[in-house]
Structure formats: structure tokens, C-alpha cells
Amino acid sequence: MSSARDAILASVRAGLRGASVSELPPVRTGAGVPENDRVARFQTMLERVGARLVCVADPAAASAELVRICAAAGVRALVASDAPLVAPMLAGLPPAIGRFAPDAPRAELFACELGLSSAQWGIAETGTLVLESAEERHRLASLLPPHHVALLPRSRLLGTLGEAFARVRPGPGAPPSRTITFVTGPSRTADIELELVVGVHGPKHLTVLLLDSA
């Protein structure tokens, strides 16, 4: 038993060797992120976890970027949430790309290469997206396809996790979200022998389109 324990600990030490916590920006838990620093901080943290940020001026520019993403990835079909921001994006896609709603048959959804949703909030300090089910049907669009593209208005980019928790509370008379999803980069796991694998439990790629105006 002791030799097995020693082997496991040695493997953990080997995996951690060379990693430096100082390479990451410090996480602020309630200290705040100045508004003029939020986009840069958000981009830095997204890139740290293997995601990508694209800043776009308006929905038309976001739609053009989506067309480029689909062309580069060879997307033949996508599933889109029912968020108001998403519908105009679909109009600019080539007719050959199939478009499915989250309630389409599962076989068709599993064949989609891209999922398109909006995000209700972004968190600059961690590079996290917050998706609320009371605002849109997002779960299948954000979890099933290998590439998730999320639309986030710049006005919804918050500084800290604490600010996000304060915002997701429903107002008087508003229905609460049955599901609140926090997305930090592509899906990843190290459950098996501490081997990091991307895309096992969800999308392998995440692109955030940050809209200056929405």
C-alpha cells in the first residue's frame, strides 16, 4: 500500500513540477476589477484556459465573424439557443449550413459541429461566462457541439465572481433560473491518471464574441 501511495504522490509532484502560480494574474474575490481593465483581464483569463475572445462592434460584425468561424471549422450544422441576440446572427449564414433549435431531435443535435448562445454575464477576474436558463434555452447549444460560440454584450462584463452572484438573483416577480451554468474555457478533465483531456464532457473549443453595442 505504501509503495502505491508513494507512486501516486510522485506522479502528482512530477505533474506539478515546472508549474508556477506566479504566472497567473491574482484572482480578486470581491476587490473589484476597474471597468477600463475588464476587457483586457477577461481576454487574458480566457486565453489562459484555452478559449478565444473576439471584440466586435455590433451584431452585424458578430454575424460576419460567425460566418468566418463556420467556414474555418467546416461547420455543416449548428444548434442555436432562443436568445434574442442569437436570431439575427443566423440570417447571415450560408443556406447550406443547417440550423437547429434546442428542441430538435437528439440525433440531429449530436451531428451539429457548433453551438451558438448568448451569455447573461461575463466575469473578468476568471474569464467565466454565466448562462441563466430563465433567459434562454442554452444547455444543449452550449454543451453538445464541439465548438461553442457565445455572444456577450460588453455592458454585461462584470469584474468579480461576487458581482455575478449578486446579479443572478431574480428581481421581484421574476422567475428564478432552474439552471445557472458557469463556463470557464473549453471542457476539460484530469480524472484518469491526472492526464488532462480537453473536450470530454463538453465543447473542445470556446469563442466569445464581445459586442460593443447590442
Image (cartoon, rainbow, N blue to C red):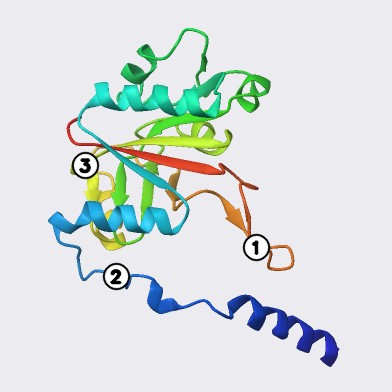
Residue at the image point whose x is 25% and y is 55% from the top: 40
Q: Quadrant of residue 111?
A: top right
Mark 2 Cα shell of 10 Å, populated few (<14), some (14-19), many (≥20): some
| Residue located farthest toward the top when viewing the structure as drawn | 95
- Amino acid type of the residue that numbered disc 1 sits on in the rendered structure: Ala
Task: Tell which circle, 3 or 1, labels the residue nearer the N-terminal end.
Answer: 3
Real-space CA distance between mark 2 and mark 1, rounded to the nearest whole angstrom:
26 Å
* Residue located beneath label 3 in the image: 154
Which corner quadrant holds the C terminus?
Answer: top left
Q: Please, is residue 213 above or below residue 75 in the view?
A: below
Real-space CA distance between mark 3 and mark 2, rounded to the nearest whole angstrom:
21 Å
Q: Please, is residue 67 above or below residue 37 in the view?
A: above
Question: Is there a contact, CB below 8 Å, between mark 3 and mark 1?
Answer: no
Which corner quadrant holds the N terminus?
Answer: bottom right
Residue at the image point whose x is 46% and y is 57% from the top: 49
Q: Please, is residue 94 above or below residue 57 in the view?
A: above
Q: Secondary structure at mark 1?
A: loop
Residue 174, image x and y in percent?
A: 27, 37
Real-space CA distance between mark 3 and mark 1, rounded to the nearest whole angstrom:
33 Å
Residue 80, image x and y in percent?
A: 46, 24
* Residue located beneath label 2 in the image: 29
Question: Is there a contact, CB below 8 Å, between mark 2 and mark 1?
Answer: no
> How many numbered tags mark residues here?
3
Q: Is residue 48 left or right of residue 209?
A: right
* Residue located beneath label 1 in the image: 190
Residue 48, image x and y in percent?
A: 42, 59
